[in-house]
Image (cartoon, rainbow, N blue to C red):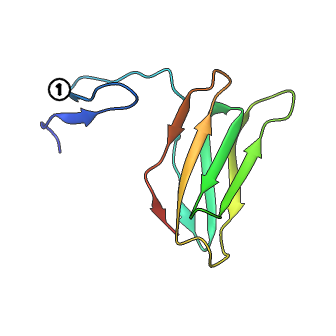
Amino acid sequence: MLGRPLRVGGHGPSYELSPGASHASAEPTIHDCPVEAGQVKLPCSPAIRVVFKGTRDSWIKRHANAGPAIRGTTADLSDEKWPFIRAVVVDDKGQKAWTNPIRV
C-alpha cells in the first residue's frame, strides 16, 4: 500500500491520510494481538480494563486494581465457544481502542 492514501476513522468522520503523513490519537494503543494454540496475548498502552469479546455469551474481562495500570494481558481461548474474538482496551479517561474480529 505504499504511496496510497490510508483511510482513517474512529468516533468522528473518516478521512484519507496522505502517504508519508502520520496519525496521532489520544486513545489507548494495542500493540499486537496474536492468537496461537488457543492463547491470546495482548500488549497495550496503560489501561484500566481489557475485554476479550466473542459471541454474545462469551467474554473475558481484566481490570487494573488500585495501583499500576494494565500494560497487557493474556487469556485462554481454547474453549470451543470462541470462534473469534475482538479485544477492547479502555484507558483511565474512558477512551477505547479495539481490534477487528480475530479468528481463534
| Residue under the image location 51 percent in, 26 percent down | 27
Taking the image as shown, residue 68 lies to the left or right of residue 97, namely right
Q: Position of residue 53 (x, y in %)?
A: 59, 56
Q: Does any portion of residue 29 appear in the rendered image?
A: no
Q: Position of residue 31 (x, y in %)?
A: 52, 42
Under circle 1, the secondary element is loop
Q: What quarter of the picture does the N terminus occupy?
A: top left
Q: Nearer the viewer, residue 75 or 13?
A: 13
Q: Position of residue 49 (x, y in %)?
A: 70, 38
Q: Residue furthest bottom?
A: 80
Q: Nearer the viewer, residue 44 or 89?
A: 89
| Residue under the image location 67 percent in, 32 percent down | 47
| Residue under the image location 12 percent in, 36 percent down | 3
Task: State which quadrant residue 101 falls in.
Answer: bottom left
- Estimate how packed mark 1 is, as few (under 14), some (14 to 19) or many (20 or more) residues with alpha carbons within 10 Å: few
Identify whether 56 is placed above or below 45: below
| Residue under the image location 66 percent in, 75 percent down | 78
Task: State which quadrant residue 90 falls in.
Answer: top right
Give the residue number, with chain letter if any, for mark 1. 18
Amino acid type, mark 1: Ser
Q: Position of residue 93 (x, y in %)?
A: 64, 20
Task: State which quadrant residue 11 falls in.
Answer: top left
Q: Does any portion of residue 6 appear in the rendered image?
A: yes
Q: Residue furthest front?
A: 56
Q: Residue furthest right?
A: 66
